Structure formats: structure tokens, C-alpha cells
Image (cartoon, coloured by chain):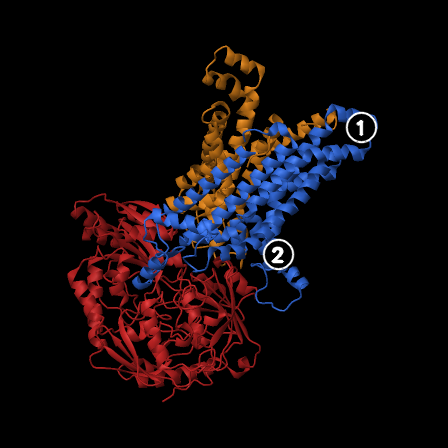
Amino acid sequence: MGRRLAHFAGLVCAVVVLNFFLPRLLPGSPVAGGSGAEAVLLPAAAREALVQTYHLDDPVAVQFVRYLAGLARGDLGTSLVSHRPVTDILAERLPWTLFLVGGAVLLAAVIGGLVGWLAAWKAQARLARAAQAALVGVGTLPEFLVAMLAIVFLASRWPLFPAGGASTPFEAGGSPLRVLADVLWHAALPGLVLTIGFAPPFALLVRGAAVSVLGQPYLVTARAKGLPPRRVAWHALRNALPPVATLLGLRLAAAVAGAAVVERIFAYPGMGWLLYQAVAARDFPVLQGVVFTTSLAVLTVTLVLDLLAAWFDPRLAGPP
Amino acid sequence: MDLGSLPTVSAAVRRSTRSDHRAVALGAAAILAAALAVSFPPAAQARSPAVLRLLWWTDVGFPTPFAFSTVGPGGVVRLSLLYDTLTWKDPQGVIPWLAQSWRIAPDGRRITFALRPDVLWHDGRPLTARDVQFTFEYYRVHPFAWMDTRIVERALAEGLHTVTVVLREPFAPFLEQVAGTVPIIPAHVWQGIDEPRRAQTPAVAVGSGPYRLAEYRPAAGDYRFVANPRYFRGRPRFDEIRYSVLPAERQILAVQSGQADVAMADTYDVVRAFADHPYLRVWATEPLSVARLLFNLERPPLDWKPVRQAIAYATNRMQLATLVTRGPGLPGSPGVIPPGDPWAAPNLRAYPFDPARARTLLAQAGLAAPSVEIVTSPSPVAPLLQRMLREVGIEVTLRTVDAQTRAALIAEARFQAALTFHIGAGGDPDYLRRWFVGDEANLFGQSRAFSHPEFQALAAAQVGMLDVGARRRVVAAMQAILAEELPTLVLYYRRFYWVYDSRKFTPVPARGGLMNGIPLVENKLALITPSDFLPMR
Amino acid sequence: MSGSGPDGRIRRGRRRFAAAGAGGAALGLVLVLTIAAPHLAPYDPHQSVGGPVSPPDARFRLGTNALGQDLLSQVLYGARTSLLLGVLVAGASTILSAAAGTAAAMWEQGRRGLLVLIDLFLAIPGIPVVVLLVMFAGPGFWPLVAAMVLIGWAGFARIVAAQVRVTMAQVYVEAAWAAGATASRIVHSSVLPEIAPILAAKFLLTVRWAILLEAALGLLGLGDPARPSWGLILHQAFAHPLLFTTDAWAWWAGPPAAAIVLTSLALMAVGQDLDAWLNPQAATPR
């Protein structure tokens, strides 16, 4: 336990250090440049003011100490582009990403798990196998392609869904139910695209785990002797649960990072798109905030999964 | 391109000079009022509630002059709907705005503005000379991020509605570039705010413009502006203006499917695509954007003029322009200012496409096969250019980087040649000075590199010349030097093409682009009705 | 992995063979097209040979792109870039995960450090690292390869380490140790044969992953504009403002998308079956 925690702490420290220094190796600065192909120039006075306000010309070591001091207070700094506290920005973006990507992961786990389970349990049923094959097949399509097709057909040719955004802007005064419906309606297409991408691994995992149990000689014998199907199913399910839980945990943790490509295509205000914008504008505080939050989430989930696994099965305890 | 729906410009107004500002003001405003009345039949005015839905590809920050985003021109233009400037531009040039008239002292340094007496801030307080004085004082401490105001030594309120701006030295571009760009801010709001960038509450978003901020959602980049019914210059045409974010490549589709009213493209094919559309029209801006090659004049082999000239002969700029903009190409002029601009000099040295001549020049210079590295952002232009130069024996390697990295490499002069795209080639020609010897030259990599004493002297001289004819001659001489020395090679000029729903909206161009050469569509002249649009005395 | 009975196993095996066979055939076809691209392509893919964005006709079988370049030639040459990138990324990252995984399992002193390193790479989100690195080095072929290798090895190194530890615990390996065999000999004789199958599966699946990621990054504008690849063609198609206002999306974005999907499916079929057949317990790597 102690060793795991030390390992965790070491990793967090490494993330903090890398997170600060790596982006600063990038050429370019927040006070010059532009974005995309276009060059944009700030007048000298404005540049100097920015440098002064945010101490951009301090030695990197001094900036690092200031960053650490802020971190200790839970202050992730101020965006160099929008001049707002990074924690505010993250607090706006994180819920959308958790909702969209996290929701897609959960949905994918349920759908993928069901399909995989059926494929294992009713191995002879053509439908179950076809469902599995279809899911895996669609899952191999690149997500940007699925996204573009969804937009062409479901948002433009037949505009059933909005072309972008997370909610209808400025539709104030609706009941909570209407707001929820609106948010779900906006999340439908990007959510669909992500779910399609996430589901196949769950299906494969559940089927693999279930099949390996169902094929065990003792279970084959037990079934032959008339063990009720429900108990057999329970056995197989229990065996499939730990790896699925692990995959689910890791995918949920990774969901904090958002989904840059899908978020950009659908103009969804999530973490992935935020990070991309922050890199393009060299908005270091925002960049660090996103990477720090994401890495911390992944590390924490990994730690919790490790601890849980060790608790369930003491043989796994020991060095990670 | 389709300019048919735009007001035609009266020749009488074209003739007028800037010497009599009142005449310009009167004439321009009258023509504009007439033109607007023509282009907006009364039937169109009856629509209500009118909402104009505009698109941009990113959030542009909180709309105050301190917090807006400078990543592109979207922020500063949006600001212009909430705030006003002393002057503004219409299709003919500078027109009175907050200032109804002005007088320039003979020394060229003192400009006395007579303000409109009937302007109110969004919170109902009157806008006075004191606010103008405060604005320039406040910007000295907290600079306005889009335009330098350091040329202003001080501003003095002389009574309620008269203010004199004292410049450090005579500055010809002042009326257009500073007075027409810098938003006037309310003293009673900003007084006592020490960190204006972080002040991002509705309470500080107080301007005097035709629209006021109703809602802003930073995560989504959604803005809702509502009409300011007491606007001094006329009733806002729309009850609401909404901005939302959509990836650039899907904006046209959104307009076509009725999800937005206006969208931008940068290629000519949209003009063809919507030629027969029942109500979507395309408005082409002036060619305010340049694609150009910068040369580092301190790094061989580009320190040799013959090599730069050989590159100019070797590039088929017309072909490049036509290919990339997919329409009638506007090949780059060696004098930088777009041909057709009133400041463009005639009879500059031209470099017609002539590979044989390029090879001869290289051979004469003793450089049969020079090699050049071009720093570029991801662009289809770079590989095309590479092939053209290889044809004459110039071995080109491309170093593809993102815009930030390119800016850093250029600013530190760590490049041989660089390909860059930017707007701003319109309006007052002072950009020739800024790009090549002024402050911005650094970022365009030429302050250290283009040390041409004569050019520097001319650049310094023209900026203080209030006589247009004399200034035009100096600016022409500057262009002649640029064309001969080629510190940069403009490959082509770009227009922006705005697809708009003509049932709702009609663009009004601003001469030389909005403010300092911005090819955007949301000119506030197009967003207010002409009802109260007669100049005051 | 088995079905519910002996004959189920055989049936499934045949089906698997069929899927993998079809995948292999498709891969072979793509490879032939790739190698023969210079002979098959009707035009120089970099040369503007026609009008911009013209639909397919007799001269340009797949039409032209925004710069009037022949799309058929671009797709053929693009296969070279996409496949080369995939193979390079997969090769390098497979070797890296094999080396790191084996070392983490066998090298007592370096073990902790390696595990921390692996965990670190697993913790830092992958796409942001690629975006960062590519922006740092400039969008280009080699930076893209390097960035993908860097984020593509860690997850699999863990699996290799686990497998090697299992192998090391085998009686015959312990006997070899006791008899004084060197580490390199044990790796050669015992470890490599054990991990080779999962490495092969990882390789194929990583080729697929790299091709898809290249295309996705192209969409964010991080591709190499000077080298046609399927991702770049798609990026240029999607950047065209009028793509969806006409049927250009079908004939312009269609072929490279189909090529990506075909290759991806083929690699998936071969890779996954190889993986499942040889190594039923291991989780599927990306």
C-alpha cells in the first residue's frame, strides 16, 4: 500500500515537472504569432504589457517556483489569451467532456458488454455473432469519417440533429427537462460517433472472458449435469467483470482528456478542443492545466484500480 | 464577383479631398444614407424580431478592449459593435462618428474633435470629452491590444464636447488608424480598475455602440448582442446579433442549410457556386490579405539582390494566384501595395514570369544552384513554390512549422526565407513603414534585415505628411525601392468572400477594410438603419 | 479460445481463417498498388494538371483536388506515405515495447525506473503529446512518426513484461539460469519465441492505429502538406468550403476514406485473429 502510494506520488511529481518544462521547449510565445496559417501582430506596447503582467520574461526557474506555489494553493494560473483563471476555464469545459465522452464510454460499455455477452452465451445464434461482427466492423472505421458522414446526412441533408455545439445558444427560460432534452439532442451525434469507437473493445473483452469460463471443463460438466443456466451465467459474468471494470476505469479516466478530433468537428466545448487551442496559441497555463488534470485523473484511477485489485486478490499485492 | 447589390459610389464623392472634412462628412453621409435607403426597401424593414446569426471558428474572448482575443481580427471587429470610435469608414473613406468634425492645427500635432452631444453609454450616462481624455490616459497604462496609441502624447477635454488630442509628432494615419480603431471607453466604469484584463463582468462591458452585450458563453464561444435603441447614429437594424462557433470548413454549409446568415470563404469558387442562388449572395472584400515570401537579407544566398530577383522571375505568380484562390488571380506586385489601391504606384519594376531570365541572373551571380530553406506554415502554396524554384535550379527545402513557431523563427531572424499570410494591406499606406522598418518589422523579420537608409528616411518622412499629393509621391518612391530591392516578394493578394442571406442583410464595405485593413463583413454601417443618418452640424 | 464444443472450434477456426485470408488478400492488393504507384499513377501527384475540384471524367478518373492535382495519382502515392508511416511507427514502437517490457521483467535494478517510465507514458494523454510534439518539430513525416512511436509503446510494454515474467517463472527457464546461461541467450531461446506472436499482433494493429491517427491528425492540420497521404487528401477535402454543398464529398473524400477503411479492416482482421489465436488471454492493444 505504502509503496503504491509512493509510486503514485513519484508519478505525480514527474507529471508536474514535465508538464511545466516540455511546453516551454516549444518555439513561439503567447505574445506573437497568430493561428492557423495567418500571422497576427500585436503592437509593441500591448506585447510589453502582457509580458509584464504575466512575468513572461522572468527566468524559467522563477516561473516554475511561482507555478508550484500556485499549484499548492489550487491556483493553476491565468490564461494568457482570455485572461481568465485556468480553474474557471477547466470548470466550464470539464463537465461537457465528462458528459459527452464519459457518457459515451458508459454507453459503449453497456452496449459492447451486452453484445459480447450474447455472442459468448448464444455462440450458436447467428444474430448474436452478426451483432458482434457488425459492432467490431463499424468500430474499425476512423471516427472522423463517421463524424463527417453523420454531419452530412444527419445534420445537413436531413437536419435531424444540430451541426455543432453543446446546446442551443441562448434558449433561456426553458424547463430543466427541456434543457436536458436540448443537451442530449446536441450530444447525440458526437456521442454516437464516440460510442461506436469505444464499444468494440468491451464486446471483445466480455466475450473473451465469458467464453474462457464457459469452456472450463468443470463448467461444461456442470452444465451437462443440469446446472441451472442462471448459475452458469453468473459464473461467467463474475469472471468477465474485473477486466471490464479495469477497462472502464481507464477509459473513464482518459475521458477527462476529452476527444480532440470529435470535439473539434462538432465544435463541442470540451477539454480536447481546449487543449488543442491552447497549444496553437501557446497558452501555457491552460495547456498545463489540461494536461495536469488529465494525468492526475488517469494516475488516480490506476491507483484505485490497483488498490482494489490487491484488496480482492492479495496475491496481486507487491510491487506494481 | 457579385457586387451588384452594393450601393454604387458617386463620382462626386470620389473627387473630394480630405482637406475639407466637413464636406467629406456631409457628402459621404448623404450618399451613404441614400445608398442604404436604396438597398433596403421598406418591405425588408418590416421584419421582426430580426436576429442576425454570424459564425466564427473560435471564441474571441470577453468583449472589452482589454480582454478580447487578439488571435485573429474577430475580437476587435466584434468590439466595434459594442463600442464606438472617433471616426469610422464608409465605402469612400474616413467619416465622422463620435466626432462630428475635427480641425487639425497647422503644426499637424494638435487635432481638435467636436464630439456629438447626443451620445449615451449603454448604462444611460452621457459620453463626453472627459471620457475621450480618460480613454487615451488609460490606454497609456493599459494598452489597447490591437492598435498602438503611444503616438498620442495627451488628450485634453476642452469643455463637455470638445477634446484636443496632442500627438508626439505629426501622424498622417491618425484619423483612420488610431481615431478610427481605438474604442472610446467610459471613465466612470474603468476608473479605479487596475487589472482591466481580468475585469470580465457584465458591469464593465459598457460601450456606446449600436449593440450591447446581453450574454457571453466563453466555453462555447457564443455571444448574444441586443440592440441599443438609443443609439445616436440610427436605429439598430437587428434586435439581436448572435455569434456562434463552427469549424471554418462547415460555415458555408451552415448558411446554405439556413442555420446561419453569413459565412466566409477565401476562394472564388463560392461566387460561382451561388451565382444562381435565389437569395444567397457573395460579397468580395478588397484584396486586403497578402501571401508573401520574406527574405532574410543577412543570410546568403538571399543577401544577393540578383538571387531575390531571380526568385521573382522564377515564380509564376499569376498561376499561383489563380490556382490557390480558384478564381481570377491577383498576382503580387513587387511594390507590395495591391494594384488598384489608390496608393499603389504605377510603373514599378515588374518581374514577369521568365525562368530563362532567372537562370541568367543566377549564372551571372555565379550561383548556378543555390539552395534555400523556406519556413512555412502548412499550406499548399509552399510545395507549388518549391517546384517553380526548382525549375530554375534553386534547390528549395521546406521547413513546415505552425504559425507560432514561424513567428518565433522570423522574430529571431533564424530563417532564410519564410512564407507568411496576413491581412492589413489596405487603407493608410503606413503599413509599408510598419512592416519594413517599424515596430512590426521585427515580427516580419525585417528590422535587422532591411537596412536601406533611403527607404528608412522616406518611411519616416511620409508618416508626418498631411499633404496627400506630397505623401503619395514619397510612398511611390518607397514602393520603387521595395520593387528594386525585393526584401519581400508578394506572391498574390487574397479577397475574402462573404456568403450572405440577402433577404436579411446587405454588406457595406469600408474603404481599405474595417479599421486597419480588416476584411470582415460586420461593418456597423450595415447593422443600423439610416433613419437618423443625417450628419449633425 | 473455443466455442461450446469441439466442432464449434473447427467451424470458428475456418471462419477465422477466411477473415484473416480476406484481410491478407486485401493487404496484398494495397501493397502491390503501393509499390507499383509510379507505374499506375497517370500523373505526377504534385503537378497541377487540371482545373480545380473537377469531378471524375475520362481524363481524371477520380477527379482533381483544389489545386487541380489528379486525385487517382494522389491516392496511389498517398498509399505509400500512409503505409510507410504505419509500418515505421509499428516497427519502432513494437521493438521499443519489446525491449522495455523484457528489460522491466528481467533487469532487477532498472525495473522500478522502467515501470515508472511506462506508467508515466500511460498517464499522460496521448493525443495531446502528439499535438505538442508535432507542433514543436513542425508538421512533417518524421516528427509524426517519432511522436506516434513515443505514445504507442508504453501500453504494450506492460503486456510484454507480464508475459516475460510468466516465461521466466517456467521451470526450464529457471533451470537454464541455474546452468549459467546468459541473459541474451535466455532472451533468444526462451523469451522471444514466447512473445513473438503477441508482438506480431501488436505490430499489425499498430500499423492500423498509426494510419488512422495520421488521418485524424491531418484533420487538425498536423499532416505533412508536401507529401500526399490519405490523411492529407482527406484534410484537403474537408478543408474545402464547398465540399458538402455539392457531391464533391463523395468522389473527393470517398476514395481515400475507402482506402483507409479497407486497409484498416484488413489489418484488423489479420491482426486480431492472430492475436486471439496465439494469445487468447492478452488484452487487445491499440
Q: What element carries label 2?
A: helix
| Label 1 vs label 2, nearer the camera | 1
Q: Which residue position is annotated with label 2?
A: A154
Residue A223 got which mark?
1
Res C280 seen here: no
Please give the chain letter of the residue carrying mark 1. Answer: A
* Percent coordinates x, y for residue B386 in the rendering: 32, 48
The Cα atoms of the two marked residues, 1 and 2, are separated by: 47 Å
From this view, report whether residue B223 is shown above or below residue C22: below
Shown colour of chain B: red
C48 relative position to A110: left or right = left
A131 relative position to C98: left or right = right
Please give the chain letter of the residue carrying mark 2. Answer: A
Q: Nearer the viewer, residue B495 or A168?
A: A168
Q: Which of A252 and B202 is in front in this view?
A: B202
A109 relative position to B301: left or right = right
Could you tell me the amino acid type at mark 2?
Leu
Q: Do labels 1 and 2 share a chain?
A: yes
* Percent coordinates x, y for residue C161 in the rendering: 53, 27
Q: The orange chain is which one?
A: C
First in sequence: mark 1 or mark 2?
A: 2
